[in-house]
Image: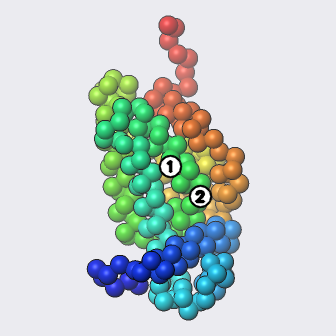
Amino acid sequence: MNRTPGRPLRADAERSVRAILAAAERVLAEHPGATVEQIAEAAGVTRTTVHRRFANRQALIDALAVEAAAKLAEAIEDGHPETAPPLVALHRATANVLRVKAAWGFALGPAAAGSEPAARIHEEIARRCVELLGRIQEQGVIAADADLEWVRRVYYALIGEVLHGEPAHGCGPATAGTAAAGTDTAGTAAALDPDALAARIVDTVLHGVGPRPAG
């Protein structure tokens, strides 16, 4: 974003940036090849206004990736992974992640995966996810010898399957396994019951699909 270092945007300029990013997600999710002009029109601003904030189309996409990654990080933190009971935190974070990923399908997809600042946010989120899984492991719910990095990857894959029918990172950047850019995540979001799906994801990660022991 073309901001002066250390100098926050005025409130009206900040609103303009948010409107542009929101419009970019909507337009690019439907038409990944959309132009800056199309995004500007959807945002209700001029092309010049967009270029005043973003040097070029790629800079806009990079900023969009950072915005979505930040919202994903906020979704995880809203689960209070360090202070809430671990299973409660995992369920709440998972439901939040489903909502964010359904709303920001393009920005969290492969077409926007080249932003280094966004990648750093995703790396931190992955670290926090493993820490939370470690808390659950300490409670004996996850086997003491389980590879938590593998558990994280399984968890991510389940979230991706719920959203797109293909593996995708639940708390991290999308990869080649993610559904193609342009997937209609708006329809997916409308059909989601995030809390019920989160419960299913968490149950599958922690207990698998085999029969439960009697009693």
Which residue sits at x=56%, y=17%?
211
Q: Can residue 201 be seen in this view?
A: yes
**Residue, disc 2:** 103
The residue lying furthest to the front in this view is 11
Q: Do the residues labelled 2 and 1 touch (CB within 8 Å)?
A: no
Q: The residue under label 1 is which amino acid type? A: Val
On the rendered structure, is 64 left or right of 8? right
Which one is nearer the viewer's eye here, 118 or 54?
54
Residue 97 - label = 1
The mark that comes first in sequence, 2 or 1, is: 1
Residue 104 on image: x %, y %: 56, 61
Q: Is residue 175 visible?
A: no
Which residue sits at x=48%, y=89%?
52
Q: The residue under label 2 is which amino acid type? A: Ala
| Color theme of the render | rainbow
Name which quarter of the figure residue 151 lies in.
top left
Which one is nearer the viewer's eye here, 100 or 124?
100
Residue 150 on image: x %, y %: 40, 40
